[in-house]
Amino acid sequence: MTNRDEITGSSGNETNETSGGDSADSVLRQVTLRSTGELADALPYLLGYRPEDSMVLVALHDSGDHGRFGGRARLGIPAASSDWQAAARQLALGLVTGSARRGSAVTGMVAYVCEEPAPGGTGRAVMERLRPLAQLLRTECGKLDVPVVEALCLSGGRYWSYCCSDEHCCPAEGRPMGLPGTSALAAAATYAGLRVRGSLGEMRVRLRPWEGREAVAAQETALDETAAKLLPRLVEADGRSEVAERTMRLAARAHRRYAAEPPRPDPLDADLRDDALLTDEEAAGLILGLQDRATRDRAAEWMEGTEADPALRLWRALSRRCVGSYGEHAAPPLTLAGWVAWSTGDDVEAREALAMALAADPGYLFARLLHRAIDEGLDPESVRSCLREERARRIGAAAGRSAAGGAPPEGSGGGGASAGAPSGGTATEQPPGGASVGDPVDGAGAGEFTAAVATVPDESVAGARGGTASAAATAPAPRPAGGPEDEPGVPGGGTSPEAEAAGQTAAVELAPVGGATGSPRSCRVPPRGRPHGNRRGPGRADARLSRPRGGGGPAGGPGTLGRARGGRRREGM
């Protein structure tokens, strides 16, 4: 049995990885777990997904006669047992210090180690192999004066307790896990409308590059050809602005195409359909065009309402097209996918997408800032507000230029993915923000911006590299629906973050890029625990690591592309 007979779930304002925010915590407050089996069955509901090859700590806080759930943190189990102690120390320290900064001392922990047996293996063998890791988790928590009240191994549909040696209670062969959806917590979550995702591997496969040989070769060829045509334009005086504008027109058309197709419930079926909506050439133009940070920032404006879901599907599809030596180019679409997921309340996918972006390019600052913001429990509404202001400012500037010229701005009737209809009756492409497609955009400072999260440093935890489970993505042969449209594509065109616990306040600063003059504007981003117009829940912390993925990419700074292969792209955001 557990060392504590009853544990009532609630995370207060603590860190957690559930995707339900306040709703998940409300469900946890209503449920009391009274046995080891119920603790084992609760893990997917505590995290919002089913962990694989993972070590998890769940903080407990005293609440009268019961324990109260607090923050949750997860790490992939390192492949080498020599790395287990460092990983255990990182996980424990990150969760304890993060909880302390948020004003709630941890009084206990529940530890989990989860790993499926290899073909022909058994869960009991996995349990014995991971016993030293469970002991390290207990000792590292003990060093912080936090006892582990229960340590469980979940493997092969069974669970074992490392804290109980009573054969009547916890037999050597383990006990079977409850049927999914049959526990009291599952019933409460279902009633509240919460859902548990599949495994992390199933989520990552939706963002990983294709692996089918024929489809990969065709997409990589399109990327090579597009890069060869795009590079000469970028050295011309007006080339960068022209490429940025054409990229946004292409993105707006693709966004409308995705919006016209209703979502499908099965993820695999949905992704196959979405892959078929893009040609190789269109995907190549968008992937390369989004390497410009100003263009990426405009694309980030598809973040809410009816614009968000088609945008998320588009960014996922582009991430799957970053094949071969273009793996590093996945950082912008993965970061955009993470941003839209976070903006719409899905912290689980947001964390995975941002961790994969940093695996593709560890120096991609925009992904690091967003991941840090989620870890610190910040509210995305303040970032959304800044993007809305920038969008409105750009529309106003476009309208002013058009009025000065004596004609209304082309395509200014809609926003985001909608198209304006000028008097002639012909629909025109509408990039995010409704700016006229005929108005050049100065990518070096004409209204574009970068977002920087400035944090007050406190403590951080050194990152220990841990392996994570992988799931191979098999690429379908893309067959675009309906073929190319009238406007061609742009011509020519995990190491996951450390378990950062530092920072107590943060601000998002919007500043012109490319040397534009003027004072930057900033907007304060409050933690979710504070009152806010769109508060979504308690703060959260994550200590997830994944192996880095190889792949070359073009060299060059922000807004430029270097060699099509072999170099390394660097940009400020």
Image (cartoon, grey):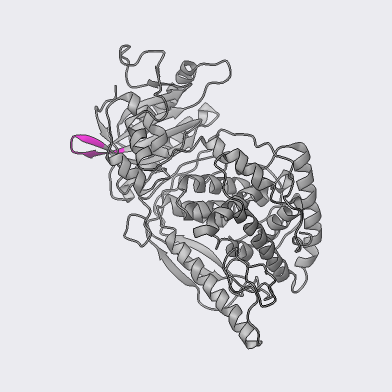
Residue 539 percent location from the top left of the image = 37, 50
Residue 467 percent location from the top left of the image = 55, 34
Q: Nearer the viewer, residue 57 or 19?
A: 19
Q: Is residue 412 magenta?
A: no
Residue 436 lies, with reference to residue 228, above or below; the image says below
Q: Does any portion of residue 72 appear in the rendered image?
A: yes
Could you tell me which quadrant the N terminus lies in? Answer: top left
Relative horizontal placement of residue 6, taking residue 523 as reference (left or right): left
Relative horizontal placement of residue 325, taking residue 357 as reference (left or right): right
Residue 312 percent location from the top left of the image = 57, 52
Residue in view at x 30 percent, y 32 percent: 147
Residue in view at x 36 percent, y 36 percent: 58
Magenta residues, start to end: 60-67
Direction left: furthest residue: 64
Residue 530 lies, with reference to residue 123, above or below; the image says below
Q: Nearer the viewer, residue 57 or 188?
A: 188
Relative horizontal placement of residue 264, taking residue 327 as reference (left or right): left
Residue 523 lies, with reference to residue 212, above or below; the image says below
- Main SS, magenta region, reads strand
Relative horizontal placement of residue 186, taking residue 55 as reference (left or right): left
Residue 476 lies, with reference to residue 481, above or below; the image says above
Q: How many marks?
A: 0
Residue 437 percent location from the top left of the image = 67, 72
Could you tell me which quadrant the C terminus lies in? Answer: bottom right
Residue in view at x 28 percent, y 50 percent: 103
Q: Nearer the viewer, residue 270 or 550?
A: 270
Residue in view at x 44 percent, y 38 percent: 196
Q: Does any portion of residue 208 appear in the rendered image?
A: no
